[in-house]
Image: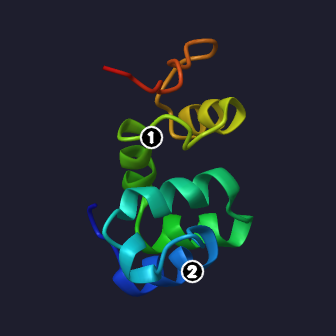
Amino acid sequence: MTNADPQLLKLLAQKYVWWKSPEEALENPQRIIAQVMEIGDYADVQLVSERIGETAFREALTQAEAGQFNARSWAYWHYRLGLCEVDQVPPLPKRRFV
């Protein structure tokens, strides 16, 4: 993840990826950012935007796994980041079973 701030990500991991240790969560910074996008409060979203950059949000969306975003957040972030036109939100990622 570009411009990742490990100290900030560690703090956010403690709050938003509570089922893993911060060190484990840091192995997948995209997941931490996705959690902030999905359930983060305004202050934390602004903090990520300012200190890590909106590129991190774009990367989290393009690398999202099934279940990381609900439909409302998925649409919101695509519109907010200018990644789609009105009524052109891509479908949510789906699990694939082989």
Looking at this view, name the residue that lies furthest to the top.
87
Above or below, 51 relative to 91:
below
Looking at this view, name the residue that lies furthest to the bottom.
7
Residue drawn at x 41%, y 87% is 7
Residue 88 on image: x %, y %: 55, 13
Above or below, 9 relative to 58:
below
Residue 45 on image: x %, y %: 61, 64
Which of the two residues, 21 or 59, is positioned nearer the viewer here?
Answer: 21
Residue 23 on image: x %, y %: 37, 82
Residue drawn at x 45%, y 51% is 57
Where disc 1 sits, the SS reads helix
Above or below, 53 relative to 43:
above
Residue matched to label 2: 14
Q: Count residues near mark 2 (Cα–Cα under 10 Å), then give few for <14, some for 14-19, many for 20+.
A: some
Quarter of the image holding residue 89?
A: top right
Where disc 2 sits, the SS reads helix
Q: Amino acid at mark 2?
A: Gln
Q: Amino acid at mark 1?
A: Leu
Q: Count residues near mark 1 (Cα–Cα under 10 Å), then give few for <14, some for 14-19, many for 20+.
A: many
> How many numbered tags mark residues here?
2
